[in-house]
Image: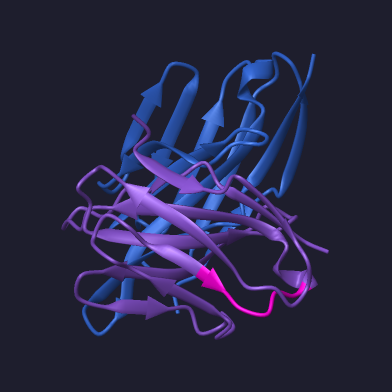
Amino acid sequence: GQQVMQIPQYQHVQEGEDFTTYCNSSTTLSNIQWYKQRPGGHPVFLIQLVKSGEVKKQKRLTFQFGEAKKNSSLHITATQTTDVGTYFCAGYGSSGAGSYQLTFGKGTKLSVIP
Amino acid sequence: DTAVSQTPKYLVTQMGNDKSIKCEQNLGHDTMYWYKQDSKKFLKIMFSYNNKELIINETVPNRFSPKSPDKAHLNLHINSLELGDSAVYFCASSSQGSSGNTIYFGEGSWLTVV
């Protein structure tokens, strides 16, 4: 079945440093989604990427979808304490027999040291 | 108004008890889900359900059963609770579409089995 691997599992950065989390799928995806979960909160949708090679930006966050539509990354420039949380990628792809499913990566927990 | 609401938010119960978690969504979505998040923050899908079919993750024990009185509600019933059932349970919903389904999560129900 479809597998989505996400690395690193944990990342500690000094405030102001950059941060990147990577996501790789075992199969070609129709789209990839990113979610953020604050400590004690619930996952919240950030963005969806659909096209091969697509790049989208949200303020200091840059999202990329690979040319082969099997990998993605989220890059945060100059992290702030408000960026703390766990970032999940989720790949939407075929699970066989004409059905599709959304598979979450295991998440990257970001800690920002003030 | 909360889009996906679930109750209770916190639940502490003894081993062997039966408990239910209720979920309602007012987004008009046609698909609802239950996810389990363990202490390592891994998000595991337990069930997905729309008005046509129930898809069960084969790793979920049959002590867990979803019950849907209508398309806006998907409750989770758990029989004979075990210590390992302690986790955060998230209800979620989405709308089926060719571009993929963005997941809207409830705020979670923290279940502690003692």
The residue sitting at 74% across, 38% down in the picture is A11
The residue sitting at 53% across, 52% down in the picture is A23
Q: Position of residue A53 (x, y in %)?
A: 32, 43
Residue B53 painted magenta: no
Residue B81 painted magenta: yes
Q: Is A107 above or below relative to A57?
A: below
Q: Position of residue A8 (x, y in %)?
A: 69, 48
Quarter occupied by the N terminus of chain B: top left
Which portion, as a residue range, is magenta? B77-82
Q: Is A9 above or below relative to A36?
A: below
The residue sitting at 79% across, 70% down in the picture is B83
The residue sitting at 33% across, 66% down in the picture is A93
Q: Which chain is blue?
A: A
Quarter occupied by the C terminus of chain B: bottom right
Give A107 or B94, whichever is nearer the viewer.
B94
Q: Colour of chain B?
A: purple
Q: How many marks?
A: 0
